[in-house]
Image (cartoon, helix red, strand yellow):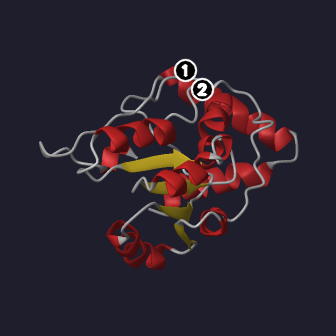
Amino acid sequence: MLLHIHANGQRRTLSSLVHGTMANAYPQAIGIQEAFPERQVIAMCGDGGLTMLMGDLLTLKQEKVPLNIVVYNNSSLGFVELEQKVDGLLDSYTDLENPDFDKLAQATGIWGKRVEEAHELKPAITEWLKHDGPALLDVKVNRMELVMPPKVAAGEVASTALYSTKAVLNGRMEDVVDLVKSNFFER
């Protein structure tokens, strides 16, 4: 995500990409928005992190916090799943059965919209950013899209190959094919 956001001296970015951190974007963004009410604050959340703190949607509405939230909805604990694969493990206990976050936001009185197709994204972002008040954009993303670190270690490549072998031997060939297609052929 942060590879696509360009600092220009007017934006500030706060992130925690340390192993095991979850659900930090949303509460940090609430605090930042309250501390700097004149600034536009955007929380870029994974679906797992947002579900941990869904009750704070009510806080946004009640306190009229004009926070913009984008949910990267891949129906999984994506970083945990990636860490398992890079360690050569079959991913397990990372599936999420998510609600439609846009409808959940709307039920709390917050603006909400869902994007499922790439061509819907740009107009949805424009509408989301123009909204006056709290707003949530639920974006379906490809679960198999890898988040590539700046440097890839040989051991990580070997362990990912080990994961692929285990997946094939466990009848999950389709997962490996999706992983390869998503990251090497659909660019």
Residue 12 drawn at (x, y percent): 24, 39
The structure residue drawn at horizontal position 50% and vertical position 42%, both measured from the top left corner, is 26
* Helix, strand or loop status at disc 1: helix
Q: Is residue 47 above or below residue 164?
A: below
Q: Quadrant of residue 88?
A: top right
The structure residue drawn at horizontal position 79% and vertical position 34%, both measured from the top left corner, is 166
| Foreground pick, 8 / 151 | 8
Residue 58 drawn at (x, y percent): 60, 53
Query: How far separated are the C-alphas under marks 1 and 2?
Result: 5 Å
Q: Is residue 180 visible?
A: yes
Residue 31 drawn at (x, y percent): 40, 37
Hey, which residue is sitting farthest right in the picture? 170
Question: Is 136 on the left-hand or right-hand side of 79?
Answer: left
Residue at the spot of label 2: 158
| Foreground pick, 1 / 46 | 46
Q: Is residue 41 above or below residue 35?
A: below
Label annotation for residue 155? 1
| Amino acid on which the number 1 mark rests in the picture | Gly
Q: Quadrant of the C terminus?
A: bottom left
Q: Residues within 10 Å of mark 1 (few under 14, many from 20)?
A: few
Q: Is residue 71 visible?
A: no
* Helix, strand or loop status at disc 2: helix
The structure residue drawn at horizontal position 66% and vertical position 56%, both measured from the top left corner, is 178
Residue 131 drawn at (x, y percent): 38, 70
| Amino acid on which the number 2 mark rests in the picture | Ala
Question: Is 35 on the left-hand or right-hand side of 102?
Answer: left
Label annotation for residue 109? none
Asked whether disc 1 touches disc 2, contact meaning CB atoms under 8 Å apart, the reply is: yes
Question: Is 174 on the left-hand or right-hand side of 135?
Answer: right
